[in-house]
Amino acid sequence: MQWEPLYNLAYKKTKQMRWNKMTNKAIRKRVFEAIDINQSYFHAPIIGVPATYLDEEVFYSDAPFLRNAPFISTMISNPNHIGVHTFEDHQMEDIFAGTQALETELIRVMAENMFNGEEKAQDGYVAAGGTEANIQAQWIYRNYFIREKEAKIDEIAMVYSSDSHYSMPKGANVLNLKSIILDVDFDNRQIVQEDMDFKIKEAIANGIKYFIVVANMSTTMFGSVDDVDLISDYFNENKLDYKLHVDGAFGGFIYPFTKENSSYGFHNPNISSITIDAHKMLQAPYGTGIFLCRKGLMEYTRTDEASYVQGLDFTLSGSRSGANAVSVWMIMMVHGPAGLKVRMQNVADKALTLKEDLEEMGIEVFHQDGINIVTIKDKYIKPTIAKKYRLVSDNYSGKANWWKVVVMKHVTQGTLDQFVEDLRLSLS
């Protein structure tokens, strides 16, 4: 089944990699072929690599079920995906060429199909999570400004909203960057444009010349999606020197399927990189964040000192589990684009129904169309309700303002209906 692009075909300039749904049998065949292409610690005379297969006393390789368990088999064979494998002009570690090829295919499928990138015009890798992927972007752009613009470290600042993930201040701390934190409207969770204008002008007056700007494709607490066009228009119109990164750690595997004409993607020339997390909406194992960026940017985090690594290293994590990359590839292929679209629309529809049910009761909520999060103002949530349904607060170190419901795959309509009824009774 050839995939029909989710985006407006007018954006397409070159042929993209096809993303086809595959049967479980075909997926098993591809993964086992990839493992066979890899050099085996069990059979090959590998004596120079400081790694081996998983401990055989715990992860024994002759278990009968393994012949039908490609992911577990990949874990046991333990391929290391150190480096970035989307480069065509770099020599990669050929010991693990088979499974690295699956990771390369995965990166292309996401960049070219989900985010409408041009053919082979993006690089990327499967990171340890969204936090690492976000800091990878910050690291790249800091080095870019230093190398290409001869910027001093105190002339570079990060710009992000107060609703952004904690990986933004964490990265700023690690990389010694200043932060410009923009206010958001309490009710609609959008960046306050007047505050952005004031704080950017203030930063310029204080010597900031270069900006690493983050746009949220669904914030963690609210599911709010920043107006990326408003943000980029401001920086373009004021002729400011910036790079724009998209944090789609939560929304990256739902928003492209529920909002087909979104500005979030590589068809938008203002966007340079995107973070996605497969271990949220895609139900992959933890440790499967994904970093995507335009060609030419990974070069700014090349670690020349990693000279013993074929192809060097460009990532924060260094050594990476090949099995995690294979798990994401398998999920993408078993569902295909049409299957994932149905799944993501389903959870988004349930969230919309919950939002409408709560509003009919007079309860104030925030809900971003196309996202599976509903956030409820604190005054409506009793401690018993929060505890029973494991709701998440926006503030555990002070007074809560909001409580979050996330409609994941395991959340049934019956559970949501019971939550609404329990909430109704608690307020009566």
Image (tube, rainbow, N blue to C red):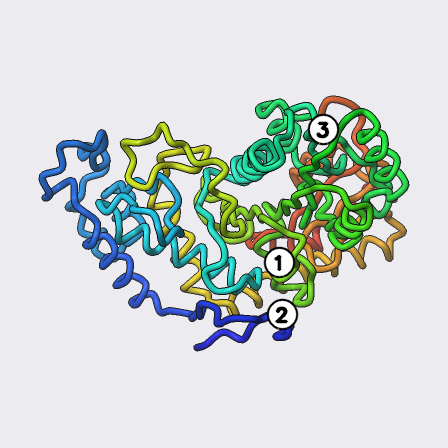
Which residue is located at x 45 percent, y 55 percent? 107
Query: Mark 2 or mark 1, which is nearer to you?
Result: 2
Which residue is located at x 35 percent, y 37 percent? 312
Regarding residue 322, the answer to whether it shows in the image is yes
Residue 389 placement (x, y as % from top left): 66, 41
**How many residues crowd around disc 3 within 10 Å: few (fewer than 14), some, or many (20 or more)?**
some
Which residue was labeled with disc 2? Answer: 11
* Quadrant (top left/top right/bottom left/bottom right) for the N terminus: bottom left
Determine whether label 2 and label 1 are within 8 Å by CB.
yes
N-term mark: 2 or 1: 2
* Quadrant (top left/top right/bottom left/bottom right) for the C terminus: top right
**How many residues crowd around disc 1 within 10 Å: few (fewer than 14), some, or many (20 or more)?**
many
Q: From mark 3 to mark 1, how far is it between C-alphas?
A: 25 Å
Residue 127 vs residue 402, the one in the foreground: 127
Amino acid marked by disc 1: Gly
Q: From mark 2 to mark 1, how far is it between C-alphas?
A: 10 Å
Amino acid marked by disc 2: Tyr
N-term mark: 3 or 2: 2
Which residue was labeled with disc 1? Answer: 265
Which residue is located at x 81 percent, y 53 percent? 358
Residue 391 placement (x, y as % from top left): 68, 39
N-term mark: 3 or 1: 3
Which residue was labeled with disc 3? Answer: 179
